[in-house]
Image (tube, rainbow, N blue to C red):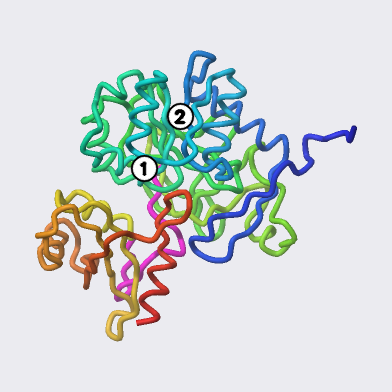
């Protein structure tokens, strides 16, 4: 029998590649166990919980939150081979599920599913959202409709993955990814790696026993990502006075319009709040005058809504330079296997035009 050490590589998980080439994050046995135990403790998992696992188990969010953490706690895992709104409602009702973990697009499908009944989800004590930022309008609408709290968290493959969750013993803040989980430290820094004051936007960096040992056969990328024991996430964030963190956007997704910074998520939040919009995403596209302008891609639930109407709606809630210069309607937005919307595919679509 080989003797395994805590720092031996347990798995190599490849990043989603939403902003570039996927990289293999080498996660050790200590990384995976510590994060599973800390998440289980933070979310209050017990042997009485029954957790629906419908995300692919090769995805680090499901691996930790819906597989390893329940195992550590002795909870029951309700394995679904694929995501289906109809089947989620059925499984939750028949198996008396207590926890559902999913990405925002799953919550959107569940919210929009016409036959979804409130009583089917009545045994749920908690819904967990991760994998991507959840629009505030969707979170609030889902909670109101089904009378269950959604705790949004944050993580990345390189951190096994969880670093933050909205605490269950204090008020949940819509739009926030929550506070530090046990044994993990997050902070927001400037370009020099110096911590910035509360409320100021900078890059989110994290450290703890959950941080990977490095990227597989990519020493230069590893050195760029892990500096001084801190993992640089590439995500722009801010922290409020109470220690709650908020993801502003991916650093690489920042749009600069005439010298002004535009965070795509801010535009997307406004679009999601429109009652005729089902899904939305914003990107920067080249512009001869401004350098870049914002373009949005929208999936409608009310087909009578026009691009002009949505642009006007945005102009009522956003500064002029943040308003989309164009809106294109699609039947569906491109997504990866875990439901994360792929901005890169839309950028490539623009280039081909």
Which residue is most to the top? 48
Look at 27% across and 54% down and name the residue there: 279
Start and end of the magenta stretch?
243-263
- Regarding residue 235, the answer to whether it shows in the image is yes
Q: Are marks 2 and 1 in contact (CB under 8 Å)?
A: no
Cα separation, mark 2 vs mark 1, equals 13 Å
Choose top left, top right, bottom left or bottom right for residue 215.
bottom right
Label 2: state its secondary structure: strand
Q: Per the image, is 50 magenta?
A: no
At horizontal 25% and vertical 58% (from top left) the residue drawn is: 299
Asked which secondary structure carries label 1, the reply is: helix
Q: Please identify the quadrant where the C terminus is shown.
A: bottom left
Which labelled disc corresponds to residue 265? none
Residue 269's spot in the image, x, y percent?
A: 26, 51
222 relative to 341 in the view: left or right = right
Structural crowding at the residue carrying mark 2, measured as other residues with C-alpha within 10 Å and reported as few (<14), some (14–19) or many (≥20)? many
Q: Residue furthest right?
A: 1
Say the numbered circle drawn on residue 52: 2
Q: Position of residue 184 (x, y in %)?
A: 58, 35
> In this picture, is 51 found above or below 326?
above
What residue is pinned by disc 1? 106
Image side of residue 202 versus residue 268, left or right:
right
Q: Is residue 208 left or right of residue 253?
A: right
């Amino acid at each position: 029998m080989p003797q395994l050490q805590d720092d031996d590589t347990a798995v190599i998980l490849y990043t989603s590649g939403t902003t570039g080439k996927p990289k293999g994050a080498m996660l050790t046995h200590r990384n995976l166990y510590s994060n599973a135990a800390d998440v289980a403790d933070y979310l209050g998992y017990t042997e009485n919980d029954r957790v629906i696992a419908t995300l692919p188990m090769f995805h680090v969010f499901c691996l930790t939150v819906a597989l390893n953490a329940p195992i550590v706690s002795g909870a029951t895992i309700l394995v679904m081979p694929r995501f289906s709104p109809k089947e989620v409602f059925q499984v939750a009702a028949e198996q008396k599920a207590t926890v559902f973990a999913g990405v925002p697009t799953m919550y959107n499908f569940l919210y929009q599913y016409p036959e979804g009944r409130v009583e089917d989800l009545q045994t749920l004590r908690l819904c967990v959202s991760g994998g991507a930022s959840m629009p505030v309008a969707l979170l609030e609408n889902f909670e109101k409709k089904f009378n269950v709290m959604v705790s949004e968290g944050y993580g990345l493959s390189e951190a096994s993955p969880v670093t933050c969750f909205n605490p269950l013993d204090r008020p949940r803040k819509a739009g926030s990814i929550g506070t530090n989980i046990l044994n993990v430290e997050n902070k927001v820094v400037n370009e020099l790696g110096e911590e910035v004051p509360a409320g100021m936007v900078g890059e989110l960096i994290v450290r703890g026993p959950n941080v990977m040992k490095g990227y597989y056969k990519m020493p230069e990328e590893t050195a760029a990502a892990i500096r001084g024991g801190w993992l640089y996430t590439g995500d722009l964030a801010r922290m409020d006075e109470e220690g709650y963190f908020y993801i502003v956007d991916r650093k690489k997704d920042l749009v600069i319009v005439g010298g002004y910074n535009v965070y795509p998520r801010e535009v997307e939040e406004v679009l999601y709040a429109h009652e005729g919009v089902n899904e939305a995403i914003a990107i920067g596209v080249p512009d001869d005058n401004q350098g870049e302008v914002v373009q949005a891609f929208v999936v409608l639930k009310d087909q009578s809504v026009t691009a002009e109407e949505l642009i006007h709606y945005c102009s009522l809630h956003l500064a002029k330079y943040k308003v989309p210069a164009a809106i294109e309607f699609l039947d569906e937005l491109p997504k990866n296997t875990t439901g994360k919307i792929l901005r890169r595919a839309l950028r490539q679509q623009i280039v081909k035009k």
